[in-house]
Amino acid sequence: MTTMTTTSVLEARGVTMRFGGLTAVRSVDFTVNTGEIVGLIGPNGAGKTTFFNCLTGLYIPTEGTVSYKGTVLPPKPHLVTKAGVARTFQNIRLFANMTVLENVLVGRHTRTKEGLWSALLRGPGFRKAERASEERAMELLGFIGLAHKRDHLARNLPYGEQRKLEIARALASEPGLLLLDEPTAGMNPQETRATEELVFAIRDKGIAVLVIEHDMRFIFNLCDRVAVLVQGEKLIEGTSDVVQADERVIAAYLGEPFEGDPGEAEAAEVTAAEATADATADTPSTTGTPGTTKGDAQ
Amino acid sequence: MTETTKTPPADPTPAPAPHGLIPLPPAAARALLLLGSVATAASAFLAWTWTAEFPGDLTITGYPGGLQWLTFTAGVLTALLTLASYGIRGLGWLLPARNNAPLVLTAIGGFAVTWFTVIAISAELGGLANLEPGGWIAAIASLIPLIGAFALPQDGNTTDGGKEALKAYIAKPDRIPAPTPTAPWIQRAAITAVTALGLGVFTYGIDTEYGELFVGYLIVVVFTVWALHTAGLLDRFSHLIAGNRSFTLAMGFLAAIAFPFTQTNDHYANIGVNILIFGTVALGLNIVVGLAGLLDLGYVAFLGVGAYTAALVSGSEFSKFSGVQFPFWAAALTGAAASLVFGVLIGAPTLRLRGDYLAIVTLGFGEIFRIAVNNMDGDSGPDITNGPNGIPAIPDLDFFGFDFGETHDLGGFTLGRFANYYLLMVLIMAIVVLVYTRAADSRIGRSWIAIREDETAATAMGINGFRVKLIAFALGAALAGLAGTVSAHVTYSVVPTPYQFAGSTPPNSAFLLAAVVLGGMGTVAGPLLGAALLYLLPEKLVFLQDKSLLAFGIALILLMRFRPEGIIANRRRQLEFHETGQLDVPQQTTLTDEPAVTKAGA
């Protein structure tokens, strides 16, 4: 467990989401503290994204409340963003026909005030605000390493850069909490590692991060705390080691162990095989233990 | 732009096939082009027919008339481009890419306009016998450059025949060499010259007196512009504009103001003012459709609200408030404000819908306006709008003693009633253009585009979708209302019938939307050009009569097939519709050091 001096940024209490007769999320309690990276894992269909959508106001939870820094979040996505919770999407949802810079500028929307009149009159205030927005956006593009592509259309960026740009766009709204929905989906190992670095850098800026991921290695390297969601219910929450060791988690991902449990020797063999596989791949091996490799086929 | 390390995939010199579809050596082909085009131009000086019954009087030898001028122009253009392809000094700028497509296109244009004329003469006067030898000579002479053009080698590296080979003739090269930097004054002179030329061409089009001439005009203009496009000159010019934006804008408005001074007949100024009203409303619709992506099929109702408001406070004796006469500025503001209120009232319930549903509901609201106005005659509703009779006898505007209804002499030029209103509309359009460009390039404009691109993502970025869409809707409505206040005075009276969804005369919702789509969504010049075309076509091609809607539908289908982004393309739109071969990469082409994506995307 992490330290207790920190205060909570996000607190979900008893969140339940029903779609007709189907209960996608069942009374989940969940907190994210300041300066923390929290992972949310679970097999496909466990209700991770539904839970995410409840947090960001896209869905209104049937029961329960979500509060950000003590105040209950309003059930409207744009107000949630304004309050300080920004998100990315599982399937990239950039503004494809806008330039890289414009995408980030759109992210600045909640932190700027200039309405139609000031746009029409173009007073000094408008110019100043535009310039400030652009500076801030360029800063963020520099942070994710896309400053040189500011005038490219978002659609023309390679996949990994689109993911980065989505993060930059979310950061532009100056959030206190960043929600990343499968940030490494479709990435190769190098890109995944770069994303890892990026998330750490974001945390170092004082922004708490909540990540949904399927890539277990990524999650366990990254997160201070991991919560496991299975069939809409929170199974366990704890540090990487605790979660990894938990039999129920392994069972949820791989199924119940059968009677003739593989012996110690066999397990060691698998570990060794994986270690060599890691060595041959150009990734410097991050320790892989059985059960922590990518568990589910997407 | 200098070619960097990147090597283009195809070397544009296919060694084995030096000639085109017609087997002739290139030198002969070029000679045919030059001689043929000169002959075509010269043939315009002959008599083509024996009687002056064919409009334009093509009977005079030694001087071209009517359609012959168009043949002459096309011939001269082809000759100039051919000379440029020979590498004559001073003409190189005409063909920056040294490609053959412009030659082919102008040759086709000359051929088309000449043969159109010859066929029109034979058809209208009843037989080939009505052609003088001059007509035969012109027909043959215009065929020669065509043969020459198709004997030239294609620009691309096409080897297979058929459709591809033909396409290669009119293909635009991928890369147009960048122009050598020129001094600012040369750039400005070029912009001025092009604006003046544009004004001349536009004025000629409006002043065409008979349908045949307008068709010929369209043929020549379309092929010439197409040729300039494939030559890369349009790209160069838009580059030039980008560097001198405010100067170009100023020149554009100067040209717009100059238009009525070139007219001797007030009828053409009437066409001009109607085009401007239509164009201004289309530009307002462009905010709603082009920027915010909201399909509004009842937009003309806002023009109606503005017109009716202005009529009610105009002091017309048939108005319900006949005692009230607002000065124009107050009437204009009232009209715009009334439209804005209607926009909000209609928008607030409907904008919660998306896509097709919104379109249907706006269509309904547009019709509700017309029917409501039709019924508010005291019998079936309150007596406000005088029902189907409308509000006639709207007095002319009067600015500080400048009566818009009278003819004024201004430094040797005579400005008629419509010319006065035309100038007022230019002012209003300037305001609308300013509002459009400023709104588009701002926080609010970006949020409109974001909503259009992906509404869910936009709201997740903190944009209040409903509010932003409502602003777009209300702003568009207010601009249409503003234009409506002038249109009420121009037409003397307001009646409910023009404010319908579709009809054969321009300001109706379908035509407005078509003007935006045809001209190019999300641009300033696009809707204006679209409006001009859509107004002029039914106006000039009287022979189409009731078939004009059919012709218009066919034209739209063809455009959507071949140029879905509209005539003047917004950069975004262009890339949206043409997925392949995007060369949007601005300035430097930096190779990414990113490895290729190995895993399959989600």
Image (cartoon, coloured by chain):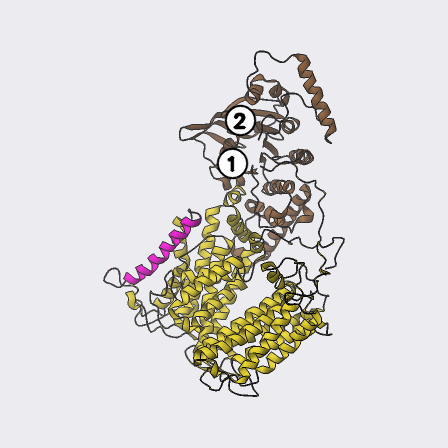
Q: Nearer the viewer, residue B525 or A144?
A: B525
Queried whether the magenta region covers residue B367, the answer comes back as yes
Tell me which amino acid carries mark 2. Phe
Q: Nearer the viewer, residue B58 or A109?
A: B58
**Mark 1 nearby-residue class (10 Å; few <14, some 14–19, many ≥20):** many
Against B234, is B586 above or below? Answer: above
Say which chain tag 1 marks: A
Tell me which chain appears brown: A
Say which chain tag 2 marks: A
Residue B400 seen in this snapshot: no
* Residue B581 place in picture, x, y as percent: 63, 53
Residue extent of the magenta highlight: B351-380
Q: Kindly indicate the quadrant of the structure image that contains residue B70.
A: bottom right
* Residue B484 place in picture, x, y as percent: 41, 65
Q: Kindly indicate the quadrant of the structure image that contains residue B574.
A: bottom right
* Residue B94 place in picture, x, y as percent: 67, 70
Q: Secondary structure at mark 2?
A: strand
Queried whether the magenta region covers residue B25, the answer comes back as no
**Magenta residues, dominant SS class:** helix
Q: Which residue corresponds to mark 1? A: A56
Q: Nearer the viewer, residue B214 or B249?
A: B214
- Residue at the extreme left: B379
Disc nearer the start of the sequence (2/1): 2
Q: How far apart, in angstroms, are the residues tagged by discs 2 and 1?
A: 14 Å
Disc 2 to disc 1: CB gap under 8 Å: no
Tell me which amino acid carries mark 1. Thr
Residue B125 seen in this snapshot: yes
B174 on left or right of B129: right
The N terminus of chain B, quarter of image: bottom right
Tell me which chain appears yellow: B
Q: Which mark is residue A30?
A: 2
Q: Which mark is residue B461?
A: none
